[in-house]
Amino acid sequence: MGGTTMLELFEVGPCKDAYQMGFLIGQRFTNQIRSRLANDLILQNQLLPFAQSKQSQPLIQSLSSNNQKRFPRYWDELVGLAEGSGVAALDIILINFRKEILPFIPKTELSNDVPTMDDISADCSSVLVVSDSMAIAAHNEDANIALLDHTYLIKGTLSNGLSFLAYTYAGELPSCAFGVNNLGLAFTLNSVPPSENEIEAGGIGRNFISRDLLEATSIEDALSKICSSEVSVGHSYNLIETRTRRIVNVETASRNRVSIYEIGKTPFFHANMYLHLQVPQLQDENSISRQTKAAVLPKTTKEEILAVLGDSEDPKYPIYMTGPTLYTLCTAVIDIDRQTLSIIQGNPHKNEVSHIFDLSSRDLKLL
């Protein structure tokens, strides 16, 4: 298995408001959220000490006010999440904005025994293809090994009838990983490493944008949501529209820079570096290694695509990760022609599916 326990699914909603939805999620996953916060070395050793310094206050206040103003419902959901789980709101705010805060922590404050950004970056891998024979988005969700058993699935239903399914990190908004809704829109996400002078202080957080994508009605609506947000840190979005058999990769950066790449019959592999948006970026050896390896592996069938995501041949930078620092928590496979989302816990090459959802059903039924 990809973790020591089965991934849990929690169905919530319709709720009277966003705060109640967040509260119920926090209440249900109190133990996972508290455990995640207690064992998160980046939170305990970097984010919290920085948050207690005077120099952090303008940054944290601008992040909070700008995102609350732009997304008041999701902010209420975040507050509910904290209060439902009985943890400090500051802790929840910090882990949801970690990528927007960490670049601004003075390097002189970091000790040698504290993990660096390289140790905690979410190194995900995605394979996308739309050909005559298949239309698939397959995605390894990779993270620090400490996040094992600190994720869950949220199936949320809103009062307007919209339902979404989101793979969620404990204490964070759904979803910084992957999600689908019953309007035929799905997404997976890959982090990208812009250089530090490309990061804008106090912009819109990536977790808030991806939460908004769960309510997108189409690829065009999702693109509008992405492009209209003045982000702090760039990101890579794989957008999937099941009813039109369409997939696009969208790379973003601060200052409203966006590049859109339409996926076709040539399989497209994305790790954690910009591929088509011209932005100064850090050279991530892990990502470069995975990109190079994937380029030489066959990807002409669904089975071969899963074999690519399950490749662990490279001893230092495998595509499928099993520690000691980074770990492939699960693999998501969105098969447009079959109208399914499959989640695999364990090496995807073995294709041992733990959950499969019907994307054509109004309630995203678990099969």
Image (tube, rainbow, N blue to C red):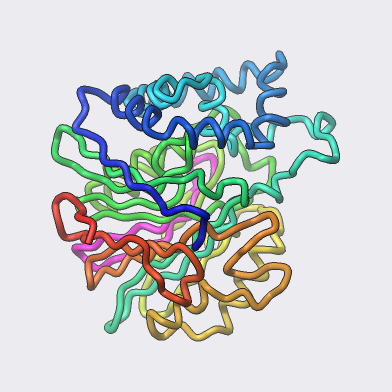
* Rendered location of residue 301, percent (x, y): 39, 84
Q: Is residue 198 left or right of residue 31?
A: right
In the picture shown, does residue 289 fall above or below 307? Answer: above
Residue 99, image quadrant:
top right
Q: Is residue 308 left or right of residue 56?
A: left
Identify the residue at image location x=41%, y=81%. Answer: 303
For the view shown, which residue lies furthest in the front direction? 5
Identify the residue at image location x=42%, y=65%. Answer: 344
In the picture shown, does residue 345 fall above or below 296? Answer: above
Q: Main secondary structure of the magenta part?
A: strand
140 vs 296, nearest the viewer: 140
In the picture shown, does residue 220 fall above or below 107? Answer: below
Indicate whether residue 247 is drawn in magenta: yes
For the view shown, which residue lies furthest in the top direction? 54
92 vs 299, nearest the viewer: 92
* Rendered location of residue 339, percent (x, y): 22, 66
Span shown in magenta: 238-257
